[in-house]
Image (cartoon, grey):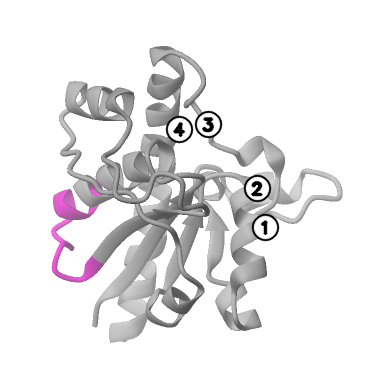
Amino acid sequence: MTYRVCFVCTGNICRSPMAESVFRARVQEAGLEGRVEIDSAGTGGWHEGDAADPRTVTVLDEHGYRSEHVARQFQPGWFARLDLVVALDTGHLKALRRLAPTEEDARKVRLLRSYTRPASDLRATPGAPEDTCADLDVPDPYYGGADGFQECLEMVEKASTGLLAAVREQLEGRIG
């Protein structure tokens, strides 16, 4: 059975295609490419049909990641076929949960950086549910320079390790 993951940011030209490329590489390294399907989209359709931002492509290429991409907008109907919807910041998380047709679908939405730290660290943040902590946002690099894209890549790479472990756990649960 295939496990389906979709990364979502604002316009699907910076953060989510970066996360898609990095996670696809992690899945391939783990030998799971036949069992995990990876995709990305934006909460808005401003860039639909566009390639990834050239700065995203550059930072991915510099670090050995493939970067083929065409932007598109996330559609509520996709929840039915997805197992996990990974938001890049709390604004995306809230927007996606509002789009979710059911409570079960809303529970599929998680912040990417929630996979970076152990859950015990997240619960230590007073008054903040573990997956809505603003300090877990991957900042939007679009209006800045190359350094922001590099920082974004580093955050995505760190979180991808924990995300891969969580997806592997889900896959093992489906078999056993």
| Residue placed furthest toward the right | 127
Write the residue at 40% across / 46% down. 12
Q: CA distance from mark 3 to mark 1?
A: 16 Å
Q: CA distance from mark 1 to mark 2?
A: 6 Å
Q: Secondary structure at mark 1?
A: helix
**Among the two numbered marks 4 and 2 on one chain, the one whose residue lies closer to the N terminus:** 2
Write the residue at 36% across / 64% down. 5
Q: Position of residue 47 (x, y in %)?
A: 39, 44
Give the magenta-colored segment's residue range: 26-36
Q: CA distance from mark 4 to mark 1?
A: 20 Å
Q: Which residue is mark 3?
A: 140
Q: Nearer the viewer, mark 4 or mark 1?
A: 1
Q: How many other residues sit within 10 Å of disc 2, few (<14), some (14-19) or many (≥20)? A: many
**Among the two numbered marks 2 and 3 on one chain, the one whose residue lies closer to the N terminus:** 2
Q: Which residue is mark 4?
A: 155
Q: Secondary structure at mark 4?
A: helix
Q: Position of residue 104 (x, y in %)?
A: 59, 82
- The kind of residue on which mark 3 rests is Asp
Query: What's the mark number on residue 90?
Result: 2
Q: Secondary structure at mark 2?
A: helix
**Does residue 48 lie above or below 78 as drawn?**
above
Q: How many other residues sit within 10 Å of disc 3, few (<14), some (14-19) or many (≥20)? A: some
